[in-house]
Image (cartoon, helix red, strand yellow):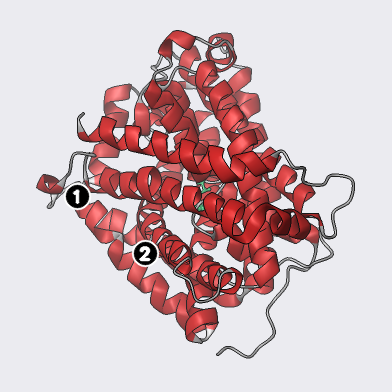
Amino acid sequence: MANEPREQWGTRLGFVLAAAGSAVGLGNIWRFPYVTGVEGGAAFLIIYIVCIVFIGYPMMVTEISMGRNTLRNPVGAFKALAPNTPWWLIGGLGVLTGFVILSYYSVIAGWSLSYIFKAAAGFPEGIDAADAMFGEHITGLGGPIGYHFVFMVLTAGIIAAGVVKGIQRVVKILMPLLAILLLLVVFRAVTLPGAGEGLAFMFAPDFSAVTPQTFLAAIGQAFFTLSLGMGAIITYGSYLSKKDEVPNSAVQIIGADTAIAVLAGIAIFPAVFALGFEPGAGPGLVFVTLPAVFAEMPAGTLFGFLFFVLLSIAALTSAISLLEVVVAYFVDEKGWPRKQAALVLGAVIFVVGIPPILGYSVWAEAGTFAGDLLDTYDFIADSVMLPFGGALTAFFAGHVWGIKNVSDEANEGAGNLRIGNWIAPFLKYVIPAGVLIVMLFGIYGVVTG
Ligand code: TRP
């Protein structure tokens, strides 16, 4: 077993920045705007915020508390709370989910890295040219694999350096930088002539666009964007001191994540509308529509460059939390040295991420009902593994570990803001049942097309 004492965040701010860094990622800047675009703008935003408050907040508090109480990775946490039972399998599912998400997350982050250089060189004008540029990039081999490799090296390097010297040091610099870059891009977008239409799209609800699918999208997005349902927050919570406030930290993490998602929407939609493009472009919104927008906007080269730097930073601070889950498991449970774990597991995840890249070229036949290989990875992780893990974690906290233990742990060290009894019905019934039902409908919907 590892016999060094467990590391602790230097300050509560260190923890909040690290967890916010985990939460704020491609989910906020790439996924949230395009899902909002597809699901009808403000109507989706409202449903999403309800999910964040009633699912996200109780789950965030629960995961932090499970980590801080047990000082373990997800598998070890379930083992410590329910010894000699199979409940640890939920933690095992979480570690596996971390593997899968990081493998394709890094591929998309790699696209973002490459777009930093494409932006600096100036994007071509017109949506067709932007589309062709994206197609050419992702169907390549050396480019996408190379950037995926570079991104995994950065991620593994930070994790190898440790919780304080790696994760905390990096997020203290990158998170404020991210906020500044985003504000600059927002300022550019809202000062474009014609920006108002985009703001109306984000903030004036049209409920006719809401379908059952919208609720699934909102719940899935709530878990994904807050890094819930697979133990990332359990792991980060395991490095938190007993003196720190849990409920308050959860509010700050969720507040930062939501603010950044909404700001990303404000950065993107006004520009998209001002230049006459479509908001419902789907996953290509950031990689096709936006470059076309930057090509036409005044000072677009600079802002395009800043935007992709910011997207890459957001992805990096999330990726490190995914790798940390997997590494913490091998360090705590298998006694591996941290550096070795970071290196070996980073390499394995790099390899697992190669099929989604090949899915755009030599393995183009290999798709499933969910789409191409990357869509398939994303569907399995985001629409199946995360909601399933989240529902089981809530059930476990509500019925096995127990609400009293959750609140006692959450309220230890808490100041004015303490966790109330209202979370009990959510953890016990609403989240497990609601999430499972919505998940099954969602899977049914995708399978039957
Ligand atoms: N929250 C990140 C995002 O929005 C992604 C992420 C990081 C994640 N760690 C996670 C998602 C753990 C689910 C679980 O991009």
Observer-nearest of 211 and 170: 211
Observer-nearest of 393 and 287: 393
Tell me if 219 is positioned left or right of 414 in this view.
Answer: left
Q: Is residue 154 visible?
A: no
Residue at 84 percent of width and 54 percent of height: 414
Residue 363 percent across, percent down from the top left: 13, 51
Residue extending furthest toward the left: 365
For the residue labelled by badge 1, is the local secondary structure a helix, a strand or a loop? Answer: loop
Q: In the picture, which quadrant includes the C terminus?
A: top left
Residue at 63 percent of width and 49 percent of height: 60
**Which of the 4 image quarters holds residue 188?**
top right
The number of numbered badges drawn on the structure is 2
Tell me if 423 is positioned left or right of 157 in this view.
Answer: right
Residue at numbered disc 1: 359
Q: In the picture, which quadrant includes the N terminus?
A: bottom right
Residue 412 percent across, percent down from the top left: 82, 60
Residue at numbered disc 2: 149
Q: Amino acid at mark 2?
A: Phe
* Mark in the foreground, 2 or 1: 1
**Label 2 Cα neighbours within 10 Å, binned few <14 / some 14-19 / many ≥20:** many
Q: Which mark is residue 61?
A: none
Residue 223 percent across, percent down from the top left: 51, 43
